[in-house]
Image (spheres, rainbow, N blue to C red):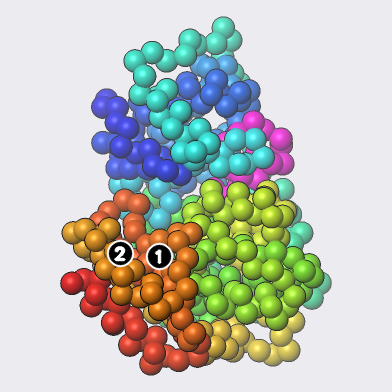
Amino acid sequence: MNLSAKGFSAFDIRGLYPEVVNEELAYRVGRTFPSLFAAKNIAVGRDIRLSSLPLQEALVKGLTEAGCDVMDLDLCGTEMMYFAVLHYHLDGGIMITGSHNEKHYNGMQLVRREARPISEDTGLKDLKAAVMSDTLPAAAAACGRVEKNDVTEEYIQYLLSYIDLDHLKPFRVVANTGNGSAGPVINAIEKLLPFDIIKVNNIPDGNFPNGVPNPLLPENRGATASVVREEEADIGVAWDGDFDRCFLFDEEGECLEGYYLVGLLAETFLRKHAGAKIVHDPRLVWNTEAVCREFGGEAVLSRSGHAFIKDKMRETGAVYGGEMSSHHYFRDFSSCDSGMLPWLLVMELLSHTQGKTLHDLARVCRERFPVSGEINSSVKDPDAALARVEAAYAPQGKVTKIDGLSVEFGQWRFNLRKSNTEPVLRLNVETRGDKALCQAKTEELLRLIRT
């Protein structure tokens, strides 16, 4: 079986199965991980993809031959692996998942003690070198043990500790798990909540009979939106395959932009933690900053990406962090991201809004700070395009380069950043209450970018 280094990125391992991510790679990760990270016991989980079970078996074989004990979580979500590492004080964890990618992809998310991410700067580069080496570490004198452990019940109790169960209202909720790993969690948690939950695509199926679970794509949102309207539900929730991201739909079936959800969650936490810090990414910022001012918090800017957000949260002690890409991070969850906590916290918020709906809350955000939505442009030379934009706009505006190019003016701002994996520039524009200006500046920038 071919061994390729192409799957190693800045934050994880991911690629086509079996060309890039395969059993040989997984076995070698298992053989080298324990010695690199001083791991004597780790948690291993997998998503619903058809290739995930053979990859997990190869990974566990490598780990146990290296003398490492394995807690086998079986089918689960990425955050359940984080939970197991934290709850049982393990030395690390590995999740076999292709996340939101097409079904022929797979990969691995890796963490150290305290569920701290292993990225290029914190050991992934060393792991890559060890995996690709001609010589693997010697096998241990005694193989490690494998113990199966279903952490669902303890994990759900942990989730519910974040909300006030006694004051939740009996909302009608559409839950679209996309045939991913979230289905069993929804089945278990609904028994403890006062909600009427209408399940969509709830049976885990790695064939993805209803399409790849990636609600970030507009074409994948109709399945949730239509059921919300048909069932006259109060809210809809859709998850990706390993449910580390969730997407909310209001009672009219309109998807709530991840940026505005950051603001709602910031409000939720600041109501409970006066003066707390909120970490956010630089693509869109004004709504989050306004919420922090209004509720007495402090907005903290961070580079995009889960490793950077988590590091910034630990550095500042921030209670919550959010990205417009729908990743949400929680201090009391060791700054890890969760796709289950956001919708539960919004349900709690709606229970205290005196009759206001999610559409009402979202409308206020949309009117105060209209956005373009993230627009991708394929360009031959991203650096040259970035330079053109900077030359045209930087002299008149306030420039920030924490992640790509951000330029702020009195009534509008934009962020333009390169993709890490393809010749694409990603543009986000926002204004202060002016939809027409947002559209005009978006078109103006796109003409320059695509010249």
- How packed mark 2 is, by other alpha carbons closer than 10 Å (few <14, some 14-19, many 20 or more), is some
Residue named by callout 1 = 405
In the rendering, which numbered label is found on residue 239? Answer: none
- Left or right of 226 in this view: 271: right
For residue 446, say whether it is visible: yes
Residue 220 shows in the view: no
Residue wearing tag 2: 386
The residue stretch that appears in magenta: 77-93
At x 34% / y 15%, what residue is drawn? 134
Residue 229 to residue 191: above or below: below
The location of residue 396, given as percent across then percent down, is 40, 78
How many neighbours does mark 1 have within 10 angstroms: few (below 14), some (14-19), or many (20 or more)?
many
Q: Position of residue 411 (x, y in %)?
A: 48, 86
Which x, y percent locates residue 196? 63, 75
Q: Is residue 148 above or below residue 182?
A: above
Q: Position of residue 70 (x, y in %)?
A: 59, 28
Q: Is residue 342 left or right of residue 304?
A: right
Helix, strand or loop at label 1? It is strand
Q: Residue at x 46, y 38 (%)?
A: 120
Which three-letter amino acid code belongs to the residue tagged 2?
A: Leu
The answer to which of marks 1 and 2 sits earlier in the sequence is 2
Please, what secondary structure does the residue beneath circle 2 have?
Answer: helix
Are dots 1 and 2 in contact, CB under 8 Å?
yes
Q: Is residue 167 magenta?
A: no
What residue lies at 35% left-to-right and 24% top-to-bottom?
A: 132
